[in-house]
Image (cartoon, rainbow, N blue to C red):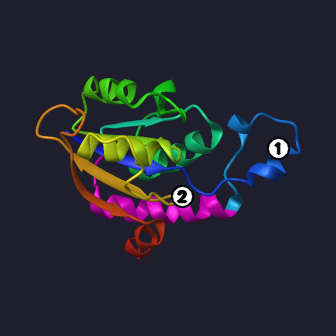
């Protein structure tokens, strides 16, 4: 199994959005963030041609990013999972991933949660050992089911390189 970890694209400024009085969970992508993510998704498809399952955090910016990926890959739907919310227990995330059935499962979420989860999956250590920029991605492979420390980091690519791969 492979887990494709994707950080949400550039969202509206947190402080400016807070002035609207709306919950931060509703903070959307910027127009520029969506534009850059569309190109990054095209590049991502060059190195990961198929995604079997696409799951996003329920927060708006992650869902909007996943929707861009869904359209590029022509996937029927985006699932949402609370386990991808910031601050969720890493062990809960690993257990959830171990229950997925696709060969390539893409997850879209937030920092520092995704860096912590990635590091936990490849080393078993709870720290942010991998940097994921907004719109960037990492691929982790497993001989069997995802488990703490059982993964192999195949690559971690910043969004600029993904956009370059789009041509």
Say which residue label 2 marks. Answer: 134
**Residue 38 falls within the magenta-colored stretch:** yes
| Place of residue 140 in the rendered image (x, y in percent of width and height, measured from the top left) | 26, 48
Residue 114 horizontal side relative to residue 29, left or right: left
Say which residue label 1 marks. Answer: 18
Residue at 47% of width from left, 66% of height from top? 159
Q: Which residue is situated farthest in the left direction here?
A: 143
In the image, 150 versus 136, the foreground residue is: 150
In the image, 74 versus 10, the foreground residue is: 10
Q: Which residues, given as a range, are shown in magenta?
A: 32-51
First reached walking from the N terminus: tag 1 or tag 2: 1
| Place of residue 53 in the rendered image (x, y in percent of width and height, measured from the top left) | 34, 35
Image height check: is 143 above or below 7? above
Image height check: is 17 above or below 25? below
Give the structural element (helix, strand or loop) at label 1: helix
| Place of residue 9 in the rendered image (x, y in percent of width and height, measured from the top left) | 57, 55
| Place of residue 129 in the rendered image (x, y in percent of width and height, measured from the top left) | 37, 54
């Amino acid at each position: 199994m492979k887990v494709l970890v994707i950080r949400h694209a550039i969202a509206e400024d947190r402080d400016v959005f807070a002035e609207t009085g709306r919950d931060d969970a509703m903070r959307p992508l910027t127009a520029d963030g969506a534009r850059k993510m569309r190109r990054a998704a095209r590049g991502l498809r060059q190195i990961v041609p198929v995604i079997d399952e696409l799951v996003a955090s329920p927060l708006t910016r992650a869902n909007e990013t996943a929707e861009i990926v869904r359209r590029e890959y022509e996937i029927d739907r985006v699932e949402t999972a609370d386990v991808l919310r910031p601050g969720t227990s890493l062990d809960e995330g690993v257990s959830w991933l171990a229950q997925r059935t696709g060969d390539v499962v893409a997850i879209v979420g937030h920092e520092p949660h995704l860096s912590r989860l990635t590091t936990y999956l490849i080393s078993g250590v709870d720290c942010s050992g991998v940097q994921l920029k907004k719109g960037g991605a990492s691929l982790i492979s497993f001989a069997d089911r995802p488990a703490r420390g059982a993964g192999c980091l195949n690559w971690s690519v910043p969004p600029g390189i993904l956009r370059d791969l789009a041509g």
